[in-house]
Amino acid sequence: MTVLRAATAADVPVILRFLQAMAAEAGETVGSTEASLLAHGFGPSPRFHGLIAEGAAGHLGMVLYFPEYSTWRGEMGLFVQDVYVSAEGRGLGLGRQLLAGAVAHADWAPQFLTLMVAHVNTSARAFYDALGFDLRDDADQLILRGEGLRALMQG
């Protein structure tokens, strides 16, 4: 039997381990540290929420999420930053349970759920397609960071 529960500060090492595993599967590295996760997720003003899936084999997955507001819809939504199911937990329906659990646990009554998936992650794309996800719109998500962000802030 699998249980979903709210992530706590004590789960930070598990969250980091899952993030590192997810990044490794994508050939990436993760910039988060235990200190940054603790400060941003479990400090005085948490910037994200999380659920941990546990079973007899231990920690099986997680979802990290935060509120999103759509001015176009005039509604609150939920943005899933990360969802991960370990190799031991795959095939048990945990991905669906984690997403549904995030919506159910959100205290802002989300009316929609948004997430991003890499174009090359065909198995994740098939999973989301089966759940009924579709493209949010025709826009591309952009990011400004590092030197570009510093230049913007300097005027």
Image (tube, rainbow, N blue to C red):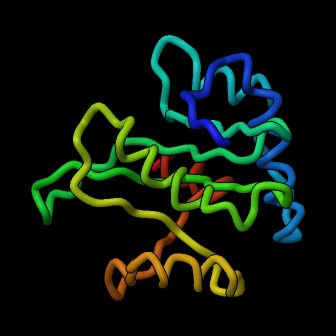
Quadrant of the rendered image containing residue 45:
top left
Q: Which residue is at a point 43% across and 52% down the rendered structure image?
A: 100
Give the vertical position of 40 relative to 129 (above or below).
Answer: above
Residue 154 at x, y = what percent?
A: 51, 45
Q: Which residue is at a point 54% across and 50% down the rendered structure image?
A: 98
Give the vertical position of 22 relative to 43 (above or below).
Answer: below
Across the whole image, how many numbered discs are drawn on residues? 0
Q: Is residue 75 left or right of residue 102?
A: left
Residue 40 at x, y = what percent?
A: 59, 27
Q: Is residue 20 left or right of residue 41?
A: right
Give the vertical position of 12 relative to 28 (above or below).
Answer: above
> Looking at the figure, which quarter contains the N terminus?
top right
- Given residues 97 and 71, the one toward you in this image is 97
- Given residues 123 and 115, the one toward you in this image is 123
Q: Is residue 24 left or right of residue 5?
A: right
Q: Which residue is at a point 82% across and 70% down the rendered structure image?
A: 26
Q: Which residue is at a point 35% across and 42% down the rendered structure image?
A: 104
- Given residues 84 and 139, the one toward you in this image is 84
Residue 74 at x, y = what percent?
A: 10, 56
- Looking at the image, the residue that sits furthest to the front is 1
Give the vertical position of 28 relative to 48 (above or below).
Answer: below
Residue 84 at x, y = what percent?
A: 69, 55
- Looking at the image, the residue that sits furthest to the top is 44
